[in-house]
Image (cartoon, grey):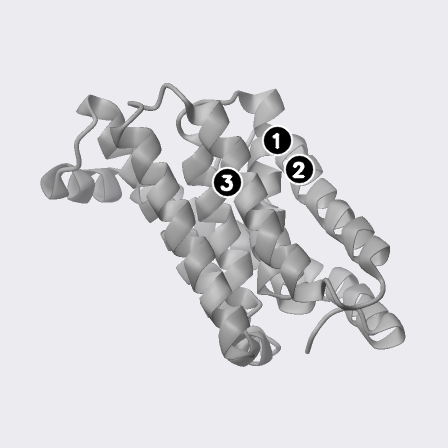
Amino acid sequence: MKIRRLTGILLLVASAAGLIFCGVTAFQDRRYNLISVILVLLACVPFYYAYEKKDGNIRRMVILAVMTAIAVVGRFVFVVLPGFKPVTAVVIIAGMYMGPEAGFLTGSLAAIISNMFFGQGPWTPFQMLAWGLPGMIAGLPGIRKALKNKSVLVIYGVVMGFMYSAIMDIWTVLSMDGTFNWIRYGAALFTAIPVTIEYMAANVVFLMLGIGPIGTKLERIRLKHGIFDE
């Protein structure tokens, strides 16, 4: 991966975290819709930049839209099981085969679009980051190659389940009085253990179910049209 591209990805994560921090502190979460929209636009920049000089932009956008739709529909289908959702697994698969920029964008879009049904709120930017990061990390070259091993993929799914819960628990603490407290955060992590285990289990189950059919098709598209980087 080129240094410029890697730098752009790191800047995206830093900017997203900084944007969410500003939303919590400067606006007291009253401008969460604005923060969410800016975060989506921010996530689009590296995606377009990575492929601006290549052919097949329409194909990339269509595939990105399809993966996002699968994640959103998956969240709807499993609405009765709050912690058991295929969203993270779909985002991870998108990142593995489409690259880190597409992985982050798929996760952030899945959060804001599905919340049009589940309800937008100050938690939305946190969800966008929590679902975007697994896809972005999964798309990094070395990690992408390692995840082709199913044992490694299972471990990654477990770790990302914990990471999602850990990021959302930051919001849990901040929602109390607008300040972060490590003792409260530790307590939030502890009380969320049953739900965190559910996140982990869901990631493993849906990764094992989806990596074959979805991954195979994405790899076939990549080889046939050459529109995603290895």
**Residue at the farthest front position:** 53
Residue 46 lies in quadrant: bottom right
**Which residue in the structure is indicated by mark 2?**
72
Q: Label 1 crowding class (10 Å Cα cut-off): few <14, some 14-19, many 20+?
A: many
The Cα atoms of the two marked residues, 3 and 1, are separated by 16 Å
Q: Nearer the viewer, residue 75 or 198?
A: 75
SS label for mark 2? helix
SS label for mark 3? helix
| Amino acid type assigned to the residue bearing label 1 in the image | Ser
Q: Are marks 1 and 2 in contact (CB under 8 Å)?
A: yes
**Which residue in the structure is indicated by mark 3?**
39
Q: Earlier in the sequence, mark 3 or mark 2?
A: 3
The Cα atoms of the two marked residues, 3 and 2, are separated by 18 Å
Q: Nearer the viewer, mark 3 or mark 1?
A: 3
Q: Nearer the viewer, residue 83 or 226?
A: 226
In this picture, residue 128 sits left or right of residue 159? right
Numbered badge on residue 220: none
Task: Classify 179 as above or below 53.
Answer: above
Numbered badge on residue 114: 1
Q: Residue at x 78, y 47 (%)?
A: 66
**Residue at the farthest left position:** 183
| Amino acid type assigned to the residue bearing label 3 in the image | Leu
